[in-house]
Image (tube, helix red, strand yellow):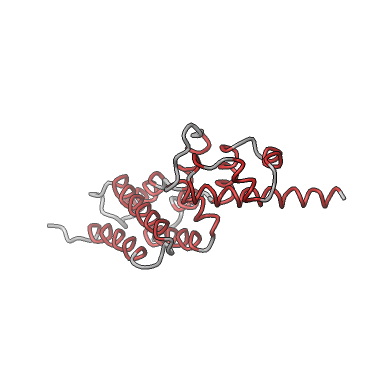
Amino acid sequence: MAGQRKIDALETRERILDAAEWCFCAYGVSHVSLEAIAEKASCTRGAIYWHFSGHADLIKGIMERGLPPYTKRLEALSYAPSPLIQKIRECLQECFAAIDGDQHVRNALTILLLRNDFLGLREPFLDSRYQESIEVTAPLALAFRRAISNGEMSSALDPEICAEMINSTMLGILRRSLLRNSCVLAGTGADVLEMAFALIAGISHRPHE
């Protein structure tokens, strides 16, 4: 009996997270009440408070469930053997493919990038989670700095600026995909990312004047 109650509690928690995720994506965080989430989840407000302390805790649960820390994968590349540029490109493409294949990830990104109207619910967790999941400039810069030292990129290139260019390109692709409700790698998304890397490679292999 105790085991079944635990299973039921976990199922209720997931149902509440599903409902909150849907409501926040559809209406924005600040426009969703706990009553609306309870109705969507077919439960009571008391059930929500049993599992979550409020809106901020619900958002935290959604982010923890839906946003893998992609930056950690990029950070690991700064210690990987050459060729680094190809590994970085493949890593980012794999991240995009993972986003396309998981609706929870897409919903969490929608809340962070398009429904980010927390109105007083901004907490250190949310800021750090955004940094871990969306802001990849720092780990990219580390990897590019290593690529320069390996001779894969021109020493005339600034690794931070290159990282900012790729990061901004990624965010633009993600935002467009979420706004259009289309796959990240569909259409020109993959081509745009490839072009950004091609520009870096072209400068790196430009003949010396």
Question: Can you say which quadrant of the picture contains the C terminus?
Answer: bottom left
Q: Is residue 124 shown above or below 77?
A: above
- Would residue 10 be found to the left or right of residue 121 on screen? right
Give 25 or 100, whichever is nearer the viewer: 25
Q: How many marks?
A: 0
The picture places residue 206, in percent across and down from the top left corner, at 19, 60
Give 42 or 166, whichever is nearer the viewer: 42
Name of the residue lying farthest toward the top: 120
The picture places residue 60, in percent across and down from the top left corner, at 57, 41
Among the 4 quarters of the image, the one containing residue 81 = bottom left
Name of the residue lying farthest toward the left: 209
Q: Residue at x 48, y 38 (%)?
A: 118
- Would residue 197 be found to the left or right of residue 17 on screen? left
Give 21 or 32, whichever is nearer the viewer: 32
Give 112 or 203, whichever is nearer the viewer: 112
Name of the residue lying farthest toward the right: 1
The picture places residue 151, in percent across and down from the top left corner, at 31, 55
Q: Residue at x 68, y 37 (%)?
A: 49
Q: Is residue 36 shown above or below 96?
A: above
The picture places residue 54, in percent across and down from the top left corner, at 61, 36
- Would residue 86 be found to the left or right of residue 8 on screen? left
